[in-house]
Image: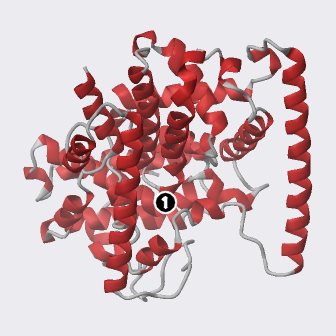
Amino acid sequence: MHSETHGTSAGSAEECSVSSLTAGNTTVTDKQDADNDGLYDFQLFLSQLKDPCADPILRYTKSFLHNFSSQKQQWRATEQQKLVNDFKLFIYDKFTAYEPFKSLDATRLANAKEGIEKLVMGKLYTKCFSPCLKNEAGKLDQEHQQDLDQDDQLRKKILEYKFIEPSHMEIASELSPKLDTFVKMSAGELEKINNYKAPRDKIVCVLNSCKVIFAFLKHSKLDVSGADIFLPLLIYTLIKSDVQALVSNVKYIERFRLPDFLQGESAYYLSSVQGAINYILEMDKTSLNINDVEAFELKYNQNQEQLSQSKLLNEQSQSTALAGAAPMSPSSYILRPLDEAANNLLNLVSEFLTSKSGTPIDDNSKSLGGEIDEETATRLAKNMEHKEHLQIRQNLQAMFPNIDPGVIQDVCIASKYRIGVCVDSLLSLMD
């Protein structure tokens, strides 16, 4: 299987180009950086792939992607994990044989390894991310189906206890004045996880979300309390969030983020989120700190009534949709995570894995709107970026009210508006 999926010869793969192979990976997601440490520059990696000497790397990669997509209708999750990680190790070894990769220093070589992971998973996302396989119900392997089942269970638990207050998680009352603001910020960062396909980009969303919580604890001078206060806050944040398919996202990261890259802070925060998920999945009334049972039961019953009404309205809405236009597929929020402007930008990128005949081998993404010219796309991108930067500065000013707004803006610019790096830098200024 190893040789079948990698291709035994670089020349055996079909003719390919960087533009066809990297379509769909060079757009909005490039704005999302990961860990503070080291270089992470996907555009640099793409420029290295354009070197004629790197043609064997391109051919190996296209051969693997083609074989992965064509040799079997649907791999089991464990098979997918092994195939992808084996290929990454295989191609990392090939970096030592071909320029320009063989001459890179350790930092740029690590960036190239990140680039391959981002490229490969960008192409295989709709085959490996469980919510994208939702329409295959009944044909899925046990692991993919379990991801979907746990997503559903987690969603139901979150809705069941959406009404809880900080005291129910034994979160100190003195944290309340700004708690909602920070929880909303943290949840907002985590909710971005479905905007990205690469495991590293997804783990960034986890890191940023957790760093906002840590910043809140630091601001409240409770950071020394460690997991005793961090985990309850994280659980509370998840319950107050609107994150879709969180279990599937965590499983996806665990499966397709190379273990060598998933260490230290990333591993700690990811395991913390997994722990919070497990807690919520098992949550019942005995899991909570309930001082006034009667008041709690009243709110619980009111929430249940609201859920029942929402379910009824949703069923009526679906019936109406079925009678008219076809409703969006269950995984639409995954396959079309970005807004219209962003998707129009994606439409400007060349077709995915084009064969010699010019027919796309596989691409589940569809155009969301009419084509736009490059000038309009650039303008839209700049407008989106401006709004995003403004929102980041406003959030950071709310998080760090004692730091001058000008300093916050300087930190944002220096950190390229990477929220995790900004939070770390601003926390260091508070010390």
Q: Residue 163: x percent and y percent?
A: 75, 33
Q: Amino acid at mark 1?
A: Leu
Q: Residue 94: x percent and y percent?
A: 22, 52
Helix, strand or loop at mark 1: helix
Taking depth in this image into account, of 406 and 350 the one nearest to the observer is 406
Q: Is residue 24 above or below residue 270?
A: below
Specify how the rendered protein is coloured.
secondary structure
Q: Is residue 283 left or right of residue 115?
A: right
Q: Is residue 336 left or right of residue 199?
A: right
Evaluate whether residue 6 shows in this view.
Answer: no
Q: Residue 252: x percent and y percent?
A: 53, 44
Residue at x 52% of width, y 37% of height: 181
Taking depth in this image into account, of 17 and 322 the one nearest to the observer is 322
Q: Is residue 70 above or below residue 196?
A: below
Residue holding disc 1: 124
Q: Residue 357: x percent and y percent?
A: 43, 89
Q: Quadrant of residue 342?
A: bottom left
Evaluate whether residue 42 shows in this view.
Answer: yes
Q: Is residue 185 above or below residue 264?
A: below
**Quadrant of the image containing the C terminus:** top left
Residue at x 85% of width, y 30% of height: 299
Q: How many marks?
A: 1
Taking depth in this image into account, of 278 and 45 the one nearest to the observer is 278
Residue at x 44% of width, y 79% of height: 347
Crowd tier of the residue under label 1, counting other residues whose Cα lies within 10 Å: few below 14, some 14–19, many 20 or above:
some
Q: Is residue 424 above or below residue 305?
A: above
Q: Quadrant of residue 34?
A: top left
Taking depth in this image into account, of 375 and 147 the one nearest to the observer is 375
Q: Is residue 322 left or right of residue 328?
A: right
Q: Quadrant of residue 62?
A: bottom left
